Amino acid sequence: MTAPARRPEDHPLLQAPLLRPFRLSPECASTPSGTGGAPAVFIDRDGVLNRLVATGYVRHPDELVLIPEALEGIRRLAQETDYRIILLTNQSVVGRGDIPRRMLERIHGKLIAEVEAAGGRFDLLQVCPHAPWMGCSCRKPRPGMLFDAAQLLGLDLGRSWTLGDSVRDILAGQAAGTKVGFIRYRQWHHEREWDRLVDEKHVVEFVAEDLGEAVGRLLELESTAPLAPLLR
């Protein structure tokens, strides 16, 4: 008798203890790991891995449409580097009561399945499900999720990168001591975030049009002598 196929939402990455998204402050705050650990790339989800939706939040797996360049970027990280690859995402859609936790797991099950089918992987999923008013310490721009990942995987945050499409991603990465890259994928949200990045004079290591380009820039910078951060 053939065993039933595993559902995407039953992927091991979505099971405890690696996915521990439902902790309120102060439990989700932790201290950074020391130096000497593995480097990581922390990657935002909406607008970086998948296209934004007009309603503001992905509420069902059918609404999750991955960006081809993002799949290629994760494939390169998985196959050409030793970086640990970590999803880092705020999902207040749960805390607001719009979707249950199980639906979020189904969405992330589809995400993992498509990433793995393209030759990529995730080593850890870090999710903040809290609404902004809940006062947690894991919601970006706070760095709690990065510190938590550093403890779980023994990461060296100083050798790590945070890649995202919003100022909150940049601030979270910098607060944790990582290098940062800004992704300016061409959807309405990104132009607003780009204007804020410029107006508030945030400093980043590079600006890229998509995750594929961002990974290429990251690898280029890491293969050469250290360069001063820039804002272009």
Image: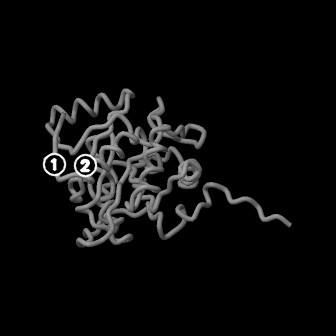
Position of residue 193 relative to residue 75, above or below, is above
Residue 42 placement (x, y as % from top left)? 35, 54
Taking 177 as reference, is 83 left or right? right
Circle 1 sits on which residue?
227
At x 33%, y 53%, the residue is 139
Circle 2 sits on which residue?
221
Mark pair 2, 1: CA separation: 7 Å
Residue 167 placement (x, y as % from top left)? 26, 41
Q: How many marks?
A: 2
Q: From the image, which quarter does the C terminus lie in?
A: top left
Q: Which residue extends farthest right?
A: 1
Q: From the image, which quarter does the N terminus lie in?
A: bottom right
Position of residue 26 relative to residue 71, above or below, is below
Mark 2 touches mark 1? (CB < 8 Å): yes
Name the residue nearer the viewer: 100 or 86.
Answer: 86
Residue 165 placement (x, y as % from top left)? 33, 40
Badge 1: few (under 14), some or many (20 or more) residues near its Cα, within 10 Å? few
Going by the numbered disc 2, the residue's amino acid type is: Leu
User: What secondary structure is marked by label 1?
Assistant: loop
Going by the numbered disc 1, the residue's amino acid type is: Leu
Name the residue nearer the viewer: 119 or 64.
Answer: 119
Q: Quarter-wise, where is residue 205 in the image?
A: top left
At x 25%, y 70%, the residue is 31
Position of residue 72 relative to residue 21, above or below, is above
Taking 41 as reference, is 56 left or right? right
Name the residue nearer the viewer: 127 or 34.
Answer: 34
Q: Looking at the image, tell me whether mark 2 or mark 1 is earlier in sequence order.
A: 2
Badge 2: few (under 14), some or many (20 or more) residues near its Cα, within 10 Å? some
Residue 2 placement (x, y as % from top left)? 82, 64
At x 41%, y 38%, the residue is 47
